[in-house]
Amino acid sequence: DQQVKQNSPSLSVQEGRISILNCDYTNSMFDYFLWYKKYPAEGPTFLISISSIKDKNEDGRFTVFLNKSAKHLSLHIVPSQPGDSAVYFCAASVRGSQGNLIFGKGTKLSVKP
Amino acid sequence: EPEVTQTPSHQVTQMGQEVILRCVPISNHLYFYWYRQILGQKVEFLVSFYNNEISEKSEIFDDQFSVERPDGSNFTLKIRSTKLEDSAMYFCASRGPSGRRYGYTFGSGTRLTVV
């Protein structure tokens, strides 16, 4: 039962270009969506979130877009840097829950110099 | 920047043995979580803990698992009789009241290997 899906296991982008990471979800009860970045041997690190009542949130080089009708969100990184190379997880929490997160399988981003 | 600290970083145990994984959440956080990630798979929710009791748990969190906050600072996950399939990275996380918007802080994880 994959409520949060990241269909691209990997993405390779040239330094300075835009990275677009995609995420689809099935549960209409999700009220917050979060993106995490993870390096090997480390825990996930919070990047950016968006409430289900918004359609865009921006923080520096990171922008998250939410399309509720399509149950789709995306993370844009502009410009991409080699240090952005990591696994990116999309996660969501259910309205009314204690906020436990449901994660996608992740997308491994490689930014080449 | 405040951190969530997990110990040990790596633990090897014999099948059937009990293990305790330890976490020190951020001091003013109120909600605590355990997640796990089996190699090559997604991060999965195990249990949430608030106000000194379990608030939610997943199907994975069966009778073999228990959590405790024994002294107001540590947060532990105990697996009573480990199985091979318990081998995974175990992550502790904590958040404050606004954490649903500002994210949860995860520890670096404990790699549990059951042999």
Image: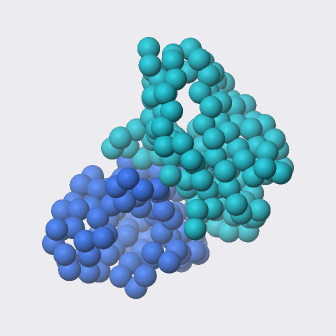
- Please provide percent x and percent y for residue B75: 41, 65
- Where is B71 relative to A107, above or below? below
Total labels: the figure holds 0
Which residue corresponds to the image point at 37% horizontal and 70% vertical from the top-left?
B77
As drawn, B5 above or below B50: above
Residue B66 drawn above or below residue B50: below
Residue B7 in sight from this viewpoint: no
Taking depth in this image into account, of B55 and A62 the one nearest to the observer is A62
Quadrant housing the C terminus of chain B: bottom left
Indicate the position of residue A103 as horizontal and vertical percent values: 55, 55
Residue A20 in sight from this viewpoint: yes
Residue drawn at 47 percent across, 50 percent down: B106
- Among the chains pictured, the one given blue colouring is B
Question: Left of B85 or right of it: where is B98?
Answer: right
A5 relative position to A113: left or right = right
Q: Residue at x 68, y 68 (%)?
A: A97
Q: Residue furthest bottom?
A: B63
Residue sitting at 48 percent across and 69 percent down? Answer: B46
* Along the line of sight, the residue nearer the viewer: B7 or A101: A101
Chain A pictured colour? cyan
Residue B103 % position (x, y): 61, 48
Residue B22 picture location, percent across and down: 34, 62
Q: How is the image coloured?
A: by chain
Q: Quadrant of residue B21?
A: bottom left
Answer above or below: position of A10 versus B17.
Answer: above
